[in-house]
Amino acid sequence: MRVTVVGSGFVGQTTAMRLVQRGLAEVVLIDIIEGLPQGLALDMRQSGPVVGFEPHVVGTNDYADTEGSDVVVITAGFPRQPGMSRMDLLGKNAGVVRGVVEQIAPGSPDAIIIVVTNPLDEMTALAAEVSGFPKERVVGMAGVLDSARLRTFIAEELGVSPLVVEAMTLGSHGDSMVPLPRHATVDGKPLVDLVDEATLERLYARTRDAGAEIVALLKKGSAYYAPSASIAKMVESIVHNTEELLPVCAWCTGQYGISGVYVGVPVRLSRSGVAEIVELDFNEDELAALRAAAEGIRAKCADLAQL
Ligand SMILES: NC(=O)c1ccc[n+]([C@@H]2O[C@H](COP(=O)([O-])OP(=O)(O)OC[C@H]3O[C@@H](n4cnc5c(N)ncnc54)[C@H](O)[C@@H]3O)[C@@H](O)[C@H]2O)c1
């Protein structure tokens, strides 16, 4: 498998490193800055003998080197600065994502595109439109990350390992993130039996603002360790055809009563992209929250079309 990572900034380079180190694919790292992806790839290859992996990673500024990719991860674009919302990036990053997709799609017409650039849901819709690819081959990464953040906060609150915490967030990568308390468990026990309502609300609010919390601490740029881990998880699911249930920004065609819009839903990924959007047993409140998130994204996509 050949995976191209577009954008060699913090998210792109840590993603490339995770993919090559785990032997998941042959990786091509590309950026507009001359020398940056080449230097990073060279450095990564030199860690191969120490860590013990095959150094299948190259850096380039030329899209010809990305041809025949099975998966394309788009991380190119501007990250948030303190005080910014993801939506503040809409105009600037739309131009970047459009240009990237126009250049990558012709050489890799069978690729699965994983969009990472923010604002995530809208950039995923844009990548699908510009590529013209079947919608099941264009997805966005946000839910794996938001869920990981929530699992971490639950674990820290209860003083347990995050490995025994199961929790999923759906909806948008932003204010209308949809947490699912009824579906969260800690060591197999329902989360709602372990914490009170106020604690739940505090954990969800912190998860919703988790990206901004890191941006404020870093003062320059945004998170990349957990984002790249989440991207690698999605790539692994595609490469190994695991069909593991993951929260993914995917195109809905009637699932949960939602149609014709990209939104975070539970998905099984495979080598052909979205193999299935799984319809979990949601109550009316959960359904309403997911549908509201979808309508918010639809409205933003309409705004984007006016830009
Ligand atoms: N979806 C998520 O959960 C999530 C998580 C973290 C970051 N992000 C987003 O990912 C993006 C990248 O974040 P980062 O921290 O790596 O930023 P960064 O500034 O470190 O890196 C961005 C890179 O993109 C490159 N770039 C810009 N225009 C390009 C183009 N046309 N073609 C190729 N490369 C181009 C830049 O040269 C730079 O190296 C941001 O939009 C950020 O908001 C999303």
Image: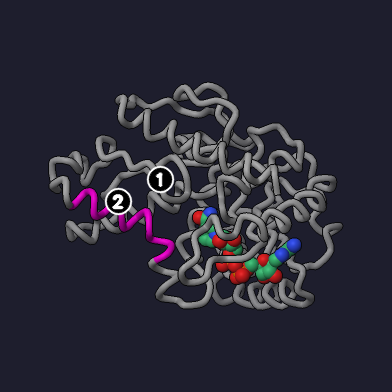
Residue tagged 1: 177
The numbered mark, 1 or 2, whose residue comes first in the sequence reads 1
Task: Classify mark 2: helix, strand or loop.
Answer: helix
Check mark 1 vs ligand 1: CB closer than 8 Å? yes or no.
no
Queried whether the magenta region covers residue 243, the answer comes back as no
Q: Is residue 278 above or below residue 170?
A: above
* Residue at point 31%, 25% (across, down): 284
Q: Which mark is residue 74?
A: none
Q: Residue at x 25, y 35 (%)?
A: 182
Q: Residue 95 at what x, y percent from top left?
A: 73, 56
Q: Main secondary structure of the magenta part?
A: helix
- The spot of residue 22 in percent (x, y) is 55, 59
Picture residue at 30% right of the left edge, 51% below the top:
204
Question: Residue at position x 79%, y 75% from top?
Answer: 34
Residue 118 point in image, percent of width and height: 57, 55
Name the residue type under label 2: Tyr
Q: Which residues are magenta?
A: 199-212
Question: Viewer-proximal residue, 295 or 50?
Answer: 295
Residue 206 % position (x, y): 31, 58
The quarter holding residue 270 reads: top right
Decide whether residue 204 is among the magenta residues. yes
Please give the label number shown on residue 204: 2
Pointers 1 and 2 in contact (C-beta within 8 Å): yes
